[in-house]
Image (cartoon, rainbow, N blue to C red):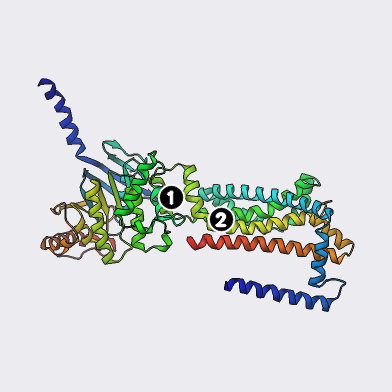
Amino acid sequence: MRGWGNTLKLVVLLLVVWQLMAWFVGDVALRTPLQTVVFTAKLVATPVFWGHFAETAQAFGMALLLAVAIGLSLGFLLGLNRFASEVLEPLLVAVYSIPKITLYPILLLSFGLGIASKVAFGTIHGVIPITLFTLGAVRAVRPVFIKTGRVMGLGTGHMIATILLPAAMPEIFTGLRVGFSLTLIGTLLGEMFASQRGLGFLLMNAIGLHNVDLIMALTFLLVLFAGSASSLLLYLNRRLYERA
Amino acid sequence: MTMRATTAMPSVATAARAQVQVSLRAVDKEFNRTGRGGEAIHALGPIDLELRQGEFFAVVGPSGCGKSTLLELVAGLSTATRGEVAFEGRPIKGRIPDGVGVVFQEDASFPWLSVRDNIAFGLRRMKIDPRERERRIDSALAMMGLTAFAQSYPAQLSGGMRQRVCIARTLVTEPRLILLDEPFGALDQQTRLLMGDEVLNLWRKTGATVFLITHALDEAAMLADRIGVMSARPGRLIDIIETGWSRDRDSRIVQEEAFGAITARLWRSLRSESLKSIGKPEAGP
């Protein structure tokens, strides 16, 4: 209950700061919280918005699916193979620190304009943290758990499904949480450049037309979505750690 | 008459062979040091040992002498560099034999499963009737005093109770050989004495052979029928002591004179080896 009280305080504080900023900066750049909510309500009533929303949701969903699937498999593969992980981990960390936007021209040329390049851009943002967290989690599984599995005669598949995965789950989940946010960033960034549809495109368009109402409404919606999704994931993550 | 006489011959021979459950012949274990030009470390051996069906055998030795390595060889978790380890007449070659259960020193209860599911985990590879399965789980819960905690998670239990969960998880498989690798090493002295009673109890009830690795001389003296004393690395058996306890013993034998005598003899055999293991060889008598 205490946690909820603090969250509420934070939300109220943010709203107050937002309101003050809106007064201070003026309507060239900002709208007040009330104006934003009113405009957002109007925006979500239009079918045009839902068309863009569906495009983004589809791209994000596919990117997340790919990032999770590739990240988990690669993480397990490397986590179980000491040599491969010693060779590839530094490379992954190096790639992780490259600003991905510099790779966007290459992705665009490889995948073309359209959903494929957005998905690819979202995926490369999310896949590395998921891989690194999974790799670390698998390597940190206590050897006595693995010995117990071996004594029970479990094969590799059973060992992964019934011992490694659940034992590594809390940390893997942390990776998924980070991967989720980064994939979302990647997908939206992908839409902001060289795209004709999606929320990212809508936002870029609004910036071009200096449509402050639309900028505010879209940002508000994205913050709402990302905020509630990561709170939910964080909550699930804490529950996983409590048991471990 | 003649029929009976001829068939009796092989069965006597089989019975004599069944007496020995585990045999180690000239077993050596070496570990490769990682890195270039590293010499192999001779961890263990040569060891010759036979475990008899149904006996309680304990191994004591200075730290780092290869006690746990010995257990891993018998469990099939590790392969001997030379020599042969056999269980019920068949050689173990890095393959985990059926009918062997292991309880480790570290807490190996799975934190993501309830006590009941932890115990049921031992049976997951075995194809047995669901009713028989439930019966075994219930009886293991009862034997280890965990019935009231079946739905709890390991994080809610004490260290001693978690170790009992691990013992119960091994028991449900009805092993013919139970390997215990310092299972009470992390517990306090009083809990250890009481857990010792429980191990004696389940040893009597199951009729399994128990092979216990321990660093505690009193634990070995109280629990075992025979105690193997190991030298400092490379570990060899330098003495085997018969305790002569009756099968229905319990922790109260620690008050008996013979107990003191056994512990004293163990320490006599071990003292110089323990000194070697900490790098202080005995200087004269």
Q: Residue furthest right?
A: A209
Marked residue chain, label 1: A
Circle 1 residue? A146
Crowding near pointer 1: few (<14 within 10 Å), some, many (20+)? some
Residue A172: x and y in percent read 56, 55
Q: Amino acid at mark 1?
A: Ile
Residue tagged 2: A172
User: Which comes before the other along the chain, label 2 or label 1?
Assistant: 1
Q: How many marks?
A: 2
> Mark 2 is on which residue type?
Ile
Query: Could you tell me which residue is drawn at 39 percent across and 62 percent down?
Result: B157
- The chain under label 2 reads A
- Residue pictured at 38% horizontal, 51% vertical: B119
Would you call the spot at circle 2 few (<14 residues within 10 Å), some (14-19), or many (20 or more)?
A: many
Labels 2 and 1 within one chain = yes
The image shows residue A58, relative to residue B159, as above or below, that is above
Taking the image as shown, residue A200 lies to the left or right of residue A164, namely right
Tag on residue A71? none
In the image, A207 versus A48, the foreground residue is: A48
Q: Is residue A193 left or right of residue A87?
A: right
Q: In the rendered image, which quarter is residue B131 located in? A: top left
Q: Position of residue B4 (x, y in %)?
A: 13, 24
Q: Residue at x 70, y 75 (%)?
A: A12
Q: Residue at x 24, y 41 (%)?
A: B21
A33, A160: nearer the viewer: A33
**Pointer 2 with pointer 1, Cβ within 8 A:** no
